Image (cartoon, rainbow, N blue to C red):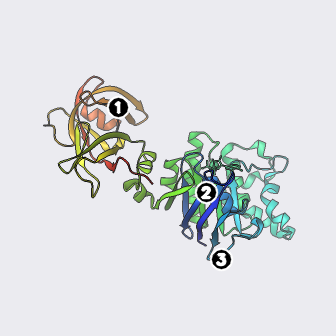
């Protein structure tokens, strides 16, 4: 059951004001997780609510499994949703929460009971049917919310920041759990998230949104390795930005000269995005070269197995570097030491680039 949207537009304000969704077009492949990824306010929830049928588009078309359902009422679209704001009913038991959608569809009692048992087993909470939501942990509540969304055997599952309110450890656990769960059930899933790690880890397809528009779509690898715009490059990976211009066919940015964008000519202003994990520090024995320069370590912070370093090349701006603790230990460097900074990878764009 693929989902396809074409030219989806939704305005909340007056004509002329920026639309919450502006001509959104993408396809979510059958049986996979597709992430809608973007910063807060980029229109992710609006797009999901349009697909769910909770909002009506001003323009555009929504197809589920090749069938136009732009005008179909929410209840008849065959979608299940679990939204952060769409909490469990607190006065109902877990069992009744899961049964809710089946009851309002007037399914036979015996069928409802067996379906709820099946779903409780699926989310591995068999023993919890008679509890109330207040007697569950945050992670357990989210699993019940998923079971409730799945009760009607939806063709499509819509999840809007489903782990948003949970603490970091539970988020990561649930993320792994959702990946396994999705593999088992193979239900076409649309996942809204502002968390790039969540999107890159969980999904096979990523749709990147900015200001209500799709700026790039593709596999997690593709959008990460080949960002289409400076926005995507800086949004995915928290990059260092170096400004400069094209000189002798290369991008001359700060102390470095890296490969320029295709078609760029001498004198063009450029910006290079360099991810902290795409920089390596080396012993200061090497000769400097185009992408290897001498620098001083100004600050080092250890976060678990990773070390974040702030280095300054000459009199330039400080740059952030991320390396594993093992790599840093092998190198044997400390704050204040001189090192060589090696830019392994830079994404370079012409400066006046607009989307
Ligand atoms: P995201 O989920 O990416 O954070 P939203 O889809 O919630 O973004 O919002 C996109 C834009 O639309 C924001 O500017 C938001 O303020 C606006 N918006 C969303 N829902 C409404 C609404 N019901 N009424 C008015 N404006 C809205
Ligand atoms: Mg949202």
Q: Is residue 131 visible?
A: yes
The mark closer to the camera, 2 or 3, is 2
Q: Residue furthest top?
A: 336
Residue under the image location 68 percent in, 63 percent down: 57
Q: Is mark 2 within 8 Å of ligand 1?
A: yes
Q: Residue 312 vs residue 192: left or right? A: left
Residue where numbered disc 3 is placed? 67
Q: Nearer the viewer, residue 42 or 302?
A: 42
Q: Residues within 10 Å of mark 3 (few under 14, many from 20)?
A: few
Q: Is residue 4 above or below residue 164?
A: below
207 on left or right of 114: left
**Foreground: 114 or 273?**
273
Is 31 positioned to the left or the right of 106 in the image? left
Q: Position of residue 7 (x, y in %)?
A: 58, 66
Q: Is residue 253 above or below residue 260?
A: above
Measure the alpha-carbon separation of dots 1 and 2. 39 Å
Residue to which mark 2 is pinned? 21
Kindly identify which residue carries mark 1.
Answer: 309
Q: Residue at x 67, y 61 (%)?
A: 50
User: x%, y% of residue 235?
Assistant: 46, 46
Q: Secondary structure at mark 2?
A: strand
Element class at badge 1? strand
> Does the CB distance between marks 2 and 3 fall below 8 Å?
no
How packed mark 2 is, by other alpha carbons closer than 10 Å (few <14, some 14-19, many 20 or more), is: many
User: Foreground: 251 or 216?
Assistant: 251
- How far apart are the two marked residues, 2 and 3, measured between alpha carbons? 22 Å
């Amino acid at each position: 059951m693929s989902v396809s949207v074409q030219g989806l537009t939704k305005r909340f304000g007056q004509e002329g004001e920026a639309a919450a969704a502006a001509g959104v077009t993408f396809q979510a492949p059958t049986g996979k997780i597709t992430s809608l990824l973007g910063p807060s306010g980029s229109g992710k929830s609006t797009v999901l609510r349009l697909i769910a049928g909770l909002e009506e588009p001003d323009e555009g078309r929504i197809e589920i499994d090749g069938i136009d359902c732009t005008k179909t009422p929410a209840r008849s679209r065959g979608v299940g949703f679990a939204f952060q704001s769409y909490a469990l009913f607190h006065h109902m038991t877990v069992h009744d929460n899961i049964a809710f959608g089946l009851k309002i569809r007037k399914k036979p009692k015996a069928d409802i009971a067996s379906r709820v048992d099946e779903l409780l087993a699926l989310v591995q909470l068999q023993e919890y049917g008679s509890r109330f939501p207040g007697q569950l942990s945050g992670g357990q509540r989210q699993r019940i919310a998923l079971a409730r969304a799945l009760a009607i055997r939806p063709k499509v599952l819509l999840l809007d920041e489903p782990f948003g309110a949970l603490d970091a450890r539970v988020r990561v656990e649930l993320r792994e759990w959702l990946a396994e769960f999705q593999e088992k059930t193979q239900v076409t899933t649309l996942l809204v998230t502002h968390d790039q790690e969540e999107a890159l880890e969980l999904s096979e397809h990523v749709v990147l949104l900015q200001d209500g528009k799709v700026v790039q779509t593709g596999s997690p690898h593709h959008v990460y390795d080949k960002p289409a715009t400076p926005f995507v490059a800086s949004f995915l990976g928290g990059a260092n930005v170096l400004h400069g211009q094209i000189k002798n066919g290369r991008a001359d940015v700060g102390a470095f000269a890296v490969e320029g964008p295709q078609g760029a000519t001498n004198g063009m202003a450029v910006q290079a995005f360099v991810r902290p994990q795409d920089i390596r520090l080396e012993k200061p024995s090497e000769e400097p070269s185009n992408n290897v320069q001498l620098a001083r370590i100004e600050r080092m912070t250890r976060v678990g197995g990773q070390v974040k370093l702030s280095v300054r090349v000459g009199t330039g701006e400080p740059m952030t570097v991320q390396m594993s603790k093992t790599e840093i230990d092998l190198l044997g460097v400390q704050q204040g030491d001189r090192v060589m900074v090696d830019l392994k990878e830079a994404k370079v764009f012409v400066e006046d680039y607009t989307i």
